Image (cartoon, rainbow, N blue to C red):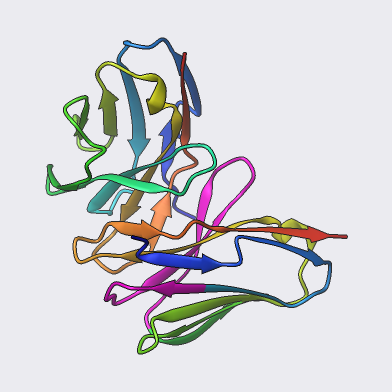
């Protein structure tokens, strides 16, 4: 069964450091998303990406965040200068088309200390 | 403002019980997704439905578009069903609004 792969599974970083979270989407999927879940809270939308550009982003996705698809396969989320409140589980999700099934990665647990 | 409301928030059941989790939403949608989040955190898609009913094994999902309500049922529940079940609806931009989740514990 096709799957979305995220790396690393867990990352610990010092406040102020840059982190890059990586996602390998399913090969024929066209829509890519990053979501996050702070411990004990519900999953929140960060950003959607289609046709090599951001299609929508939330208020959370400020200038510290960026996404790109550098080599046509990996889909990355970069946090430029991490804050304590960035500690969360980050999920990548991909969809083949609009209104199709969503496939989620296993998540990257980011801990900022 | 919550676009997606789930109930109950927590549910404990004895093995073998029939379980129902409810989801109400306020946004107009064309499809609703039920997701399962395991204790380790990973999310798995269970159903995507836009009308009527879908069944997969012991899981049944129903939706009433007019009433903006969906239910997830688990028949003959088993301890391995213990997880958080999340209802999610996409907006016109295809990003999801997530419910707060229902934490299910099935006791042997």
Which span of residues is magenta-colored?
B23-50
Where's residue B28, x and y in %?
26, 76
Question: Quadrant location of residue A98?
Answer: bottom left
Find the residue positioned furthest to the right. B108
Image point (45%, 60%), residue name = B99
Q: Nearer the viewer, residue B68 or B51?
A: B68
Image point (19%, 60%), residue name = B93
Q: Quadrant of the C terminus of chain B?
A: bottom right
Where's residue A11, x and y in %?
47, 20
- In the displayed structure image, the side of residue B54 where residue A79 appears, left or right: left
- In the displayed structure image, the side of residue B29 where residue B14 appears, left or right: right
Image point (38%, 81%), residue name = B68
Q: Is B62 above or below relative to A48?
A: below
Would residue A20 be counted in the magenta stretch? Answer: no
Question: Quadrant location of residue A102?
Answer: bottom left
Q: Is B8 above or below relative to B82?
A: below
């Amino acid at each position: 069964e096709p799957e979305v792969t995220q790396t690393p599974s867990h990352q610990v970083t010092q406040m102020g450091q840059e982190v890059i979270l990586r996602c390998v989407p399913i090969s024929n999927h066209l829509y890519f998303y990053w979501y996050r879940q702070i411990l004990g809270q519900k999953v929140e939308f960060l950003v959607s990406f289609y046709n090599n550009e951001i299609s929508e982003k939330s208020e959370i996705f400020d200038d510290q965040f960026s996404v790109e698809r550098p080599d046509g396969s990996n889909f990355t989320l970069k946090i430029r200068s991490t804050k304590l409140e960035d500690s969360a589980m980050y999920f990548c999700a991909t969809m083949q088309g609009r209104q199709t099934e969503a496939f989620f990665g296993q998540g990257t647990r980011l801990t900022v200390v | 403002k919550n676009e997606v409301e789930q109930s109950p928030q927590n549910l404990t059941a004895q093995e073998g019980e029939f379980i129902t989790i409810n989801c109400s939403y306020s946004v107009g949608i064309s499809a609703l997704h039920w997701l399962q989040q395991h204790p380790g955190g990973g999310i798995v898609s269970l159903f995507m439905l836009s009308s009527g009913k879908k069944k997969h094994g012991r899981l049944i999902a129903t939706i009433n578009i007019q009433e903006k309500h969906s239910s997830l049922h688990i028949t003959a529940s088993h301890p391995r069903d213990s997880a958080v079940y999340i209802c999610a609806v996409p907006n016109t931009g295809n990003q999801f609004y997530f419910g707060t989740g229902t934490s299910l514990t099935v006791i042997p």
